[in-house]
Image: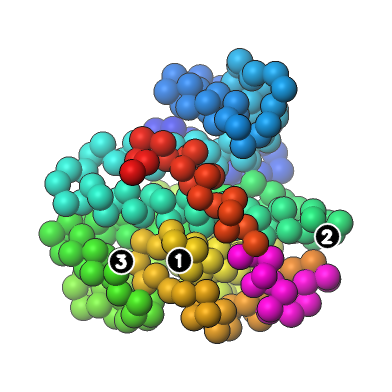
Amino acid sequence: MPETLMEALVLSKNPEQIDPTSVTKMLRKDPLAVAWLLRMANSSLHGLRRAISSPEHAVVMLGSMQVIGLVVGMSMLKLRSALSGPAGPSFNRLIRHSVATAHLSRFLIEELPAQHGASNPNGYLKGIGFTAGLLHDFGKIVLVYNFPDKAVPLYDHYGLSQDDVAALQERERLLFGCDHTEAGVFAANKLDFPDALAQAIHFHHRPEQLAGDVGIKHLVAATTLADLGARAMGHAFTSPCSQEMCATDPAWAYYLPFAPSAIDTPEALIEAVFGERENLDPQVQSFTPSMAA
């Protein structure tokens, strides 16, 4: 695993105690990370009047947790160089799906409440939604790296098939002895990921089974909807689905207690998430320019 990824995850364990100085110190160990972050900070998505020329300014402008999420994403892109042959295109598709999920997860946790003048009762989640979205399919990375001859054909098949996720997970268990959520949480615990991220990896297909901290429930539920939305908006890694099929998932109703009071029905929540469709493509492309078709 890239060293910068591991340092970013260590910092994310205590989001309330993160300060720009510690994040900048981490960045300075990786010149490529600094260059990539400055490009992101100065991208057209942020509409800045003046260019950001230092990592310190980039961290202050974007926020420490947001930068940590971006560093995690950059580290995932670095993993691409270790793959060759048929695993490469499959991994590219996984990264695009992960980035789309990350943006939608952040939208649900941070931007949707702000649009309705609502404060986030789980304010410490600010910034971590993006990282959870990036890492939610970490188990698929684990399986592709360890079993490329089996995993790549499997995921290529389900990348075209509209079979539901349960069918994919059953096939994973037959081939590998575990599904991608089990592989992901096993690796996350071995690598000492923050608990909130490990739970998002483990429960993003079944958020209703998660017990405990309400903030982590919120994070996992947002990741679940973000994954559904990304798959329905043209950024699926596996099991693509239509908006109509996506809208039948019970996760929309499950998320309502975490939504702003103005969003009081599953239909209103679905409309809000799918309203991000136009913003999603340019954000995914800006994040993964080297993979642009």
Q: Which residue position is annotated with label 1?
A: 231
Q: Position of residue 254 (x, y in %)?
A: 65, 79
Most distant residue in the right direction: 117
Q: Quadrant of the C terminus?
A: top left
User: Of helix, strand and loop, which one carries label 2?
Assistant: loop
* 41 w.r.t. 218: above or below: above
Q: Is residue 278 visible?
A: yes
* 240 w.r.t. 112: above or below: below
* Classed neighbour count for the residue bearing mark 1: other residues with Cα under 10 Å, few (<14), some (14–19), many (≥20): many
> Rounded to the nearest whole Å, what is the CA distance between mark 1 and mark 2?
26 Å
Residue range of the region highlighted in magenta in the rendering = 261-274
Q: Position of residue 115 (x, y in %)?
A: 79, 56
**Disc assigned to residue 159:** 3
Along the line of sight, the residue nearer the viewer: 130 or 286: 286
* Classed neighbour count for the residue bearing mark 3: other residues with Cα under 10 Å, few (<14), some (14–19), many (≥20): some
User: Of helix, strand and loop, which one carries label 3?
Assistant: loop
**Disc assigned to residue 116:** 2
Total numbered labels placed on residues in the image: 3
Residue at x 72% of width, y 22% of height: 49
> Rounded to the nearest whole Å, what is the CA distance between mark 2 and mark 3?
36 Å
Residue at x 64% of width, y 19% of height: 52
